[in-house]
Amino acid sequence: MSHRSVFFISDGTGITAETFGNAILAQFEFKPRHVRLPFVDTVDKAHQAVRQINQIAELEGQKPIVFTTLVNMEVLEVIQNNCKCMLLDMFGTFVNPLEKELGIKSHHRVGRFSDVSKSKEYHDRIEAINFSLSHDDGQLNRDLEQADVILVGVSRSGKTPTSLYLAMQHGLKAANYPLIPEDFERNQLPPAVKKHIHKTFGLTIHPERLSEIRHERRPNSQYASMNNCRQEVSLAEAMMRREGIRWLSTTHKSIEEIATTILQEIRPERLTY
């Protein structure tokens, strides 16, 4: 399964197809090769896409998975009729049934997603994403007073994906700081975190799981050793208790569960059901 390609085809940027497709693929334990084919808005470009996909199918010996958000039916039919792939047409899957249920026709407009970019909510979320990216792993100490939450925890405990999820899904400005050996030697939180401890939330993880994750990144290293992981987790949890920081374990929890728990603590009004 690891040598399988997934294509995201759109007559726009392809961001919607890729975002939706990745949300589905995240339910499966495999790491496919991702290929985004944006602006496939003519029959000629569709045939080019088909040739590329079919070539990959032949090389890999199995059908690529193709997610599409194609609006132009002529373009879509080229993919449907000629592609040696598993095709998942998201508009066909969701828009057509909704048309029947609502009793109205959809706009079927290319780039309809661009209308969303005019909303305040969209701009707020983009701002939150940019903030979270620039404040990832303690990269930036400035403007932390603007943060809605500051996540702390040992390296590879899930801080970065949680920060980005909070930004993308809930529009929260989330910074995160790794707790490193120097912090444990000083027996203190990083000064920037200490200053904003009222908005700090901790993430921890079972040492066994932490060791597995770190071995994938740095096999057979001291960083990934079980003894080191146990020590770091123990010291981090002790520090959080001493400082009165609310925290949770990310072990065996989905990103949605982690984010929901954090939101319940810091911004219950942001929860959507």
Image: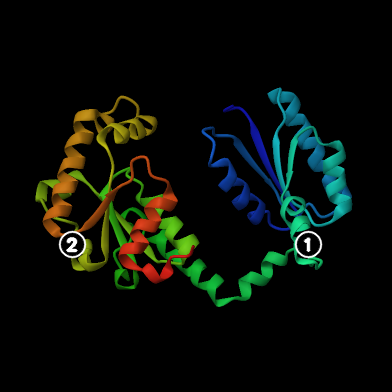
**Helix, strand or loop under label 2:** helix
Residue 249 visible, this orientation: yes
In this picture, residue 249 sits left or right of residue 216: left
Does 154 appear above or below 260? above
Residue 88 % position (x, y):
72, 43
Q: Who's the residue at 18% across and 44% down the image? A: 181
In this picture, residue 90 sits left or right of residue 203: right
**Helix, strand or loop under label 1:** helix
Instruction: Work out whether residue 231 or residue 186 is closer to the camera in this orientation and state it.
Output: 231
Q: Who's the residue at 32% across and 34% down the image? A: 209
Mark found first going from the N terminus, 1 or 2: 1
Instruction: Work out whether residue 161 or residue 97 is closer to the camera in this orientation and state it.
Output: 97
Residue furthest top in the image: 61
Residue count near mark 1 (Cα–Cα under 10 Å), binned few <14, some 14–19, many ≥20: few
Residue 152 % position (x, y):
27, 54
Q: Nearer the viewer, mark 1 or mark 2?
A: 1
Amino acid type, label 1: Glu
Amino acid type, label 2: Pro
Residue indicated by mark 1? 99
In this picture, residue 93 sits left or right of residue 237: right
Q: Who's the residue at 59% across and 44% down the image? A: 24
Instruction: Work out whether residue 71 or residue 53 is closer to the camera in this orientation and state it.
Output: 71
Residue 134 % position (x, y):
40, 61
- Quarter-wise, where is residue 157 in the image? top left
Residue 29 % position (x, y):
51, 33
Numbered tag placed on residue 191 in the rendering: 2
Residue count near mark 2 (Cα–Cα under 10 Å), binned few <14, some 14–19, many ≥20: few
